[in-house]
Image (cartoon, coloured by chain):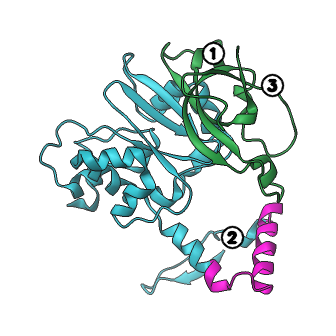
Chain colours: A cyan, B green
Amino acid sequence: MTAHTHGDGHQHPHPRQPDVEDRPLTYHMALTAAVAELLVAKGVVTADELRRTVEDIDSRHPGDGARVVARAWMDTAFKARLLEDVNDAAAELGIDCGGIPIRAVENTRRLHNLVVCTLCSCYPRMLIGLPPDWYKARAYRSRAVREPRAVLREFGVTLPDDVELVVHDSTADMRYLVVPARPDGTDGWSEEALAAIVTRDCMIGTALPRSDAPRSGGG
Amino acid sequence: MMRFHPGDEVRVRSWQPPGHIRTPWFTRGHTGRVVGMLGTFGNPENLAYGGDGAPRQPLYRVRFAQSELWSDYDGRPGDTLIVDLYEHWLEATR
């Protein structure tokens, strides 16, 4: 523990927070670092190119996907194009989803879609950012295909019996985006207001957008 | 040339090869129906080890009844699961 002052005359110790390096490197952490250093040392990529790529991936966020969904709610022609080709439709809004094709699956009053990757963590990262830790966890990956309605209940979503549930296991070369159904009570809302209720989980299928959802930003 | 078409009933092969396999275990040996075609892609079982992925494989969306995959599935009877599967893992049921 280290003692320090807060400038207000009182002095007390804080428990020491562990640093990243306090845990041993795993095999794959060491491998990743070694490969990255080799790529730079051999001039295959520059350190700046590597950094920029990581920064680009880290800058992706669910807000981009939410904009796409909100536009689809406002514009049926756009929605048709989105269901045909997500990458092209997103490009119309200035969002570059990269080369991996993303497909949209649309929720309706009678149909609910849920996305999982049982084999790893395939996810439309270039449109909605990095996946949450639970998406990569064995518990979600195994249970989402085995007992999806129970999983949804744990997320707070109880599907009525007359709603068909389709689970999409993105095992291969496609990524999947759930286009949630526009909730009642949102007539006349602006595209920005609509986008604000389309959360990350809505686009995975573990949540439903709500017109009474608390708005972020305290506004 | 696509061997299967939407509406075709297919069975996932019960192979158990080692390596980088994109066919989930829980689908192997089970029967589903082709609901879509996604194009052709390099074979990941070859790409994963530095190969060129040839011959490229058609990729299908295959829909399974949950009750076909899990004998004790306790959801609704109409619930289904759709998996993307490469052609060499599929065989015709008749």
Q: Which residues are magenta?
A: A24-50
Quickly name the residue at label 2. A20
Label placed on residue B14? 3
Mark in the foreground, 1 or 3 = 3
> With B50 as the anchor, is A216 left or right in this view?
left
Q: Chain of mark 3?
A: B
The amino acid pointed to by label 3 is: Ser
Comparing labels 3 and 2, the label whose residue is closer to the camera: 3
Q: Chain of mark 2?
A: A
| Mark 2 crowdedness (10 Å alpha carbons): few <14, some 14-19, many ≥20 | few
Q: Position of residue B7 (x, y in %)?
A: 54, 22
At x 77% / y 48%, what residue is drawn?
A: B55
- Outermost residue, front direction? B1
SS type, badge 3: loop
Q: Is residue A13 visible?
A: no
Q: Which numbered tag is attached to residue B68?
A: 1
Q: Is residue B94 magenta?
A: no
Image quadrant in which the N terminus of chain A is located: bottom right
> x%, y% of residue B5?
58, 28
Whether residue A154 appears in this view of the structure is: yes
Q: Nearer the viewer, residue A117 or A175?
A: A175
Residue at 60 percent across and 49 percent down: it is A122
A28 drawn magenta: yes
Q: Earlier in the sequence, mark 1 or mark 3?
A: 3
In front: A36, or B85? B85
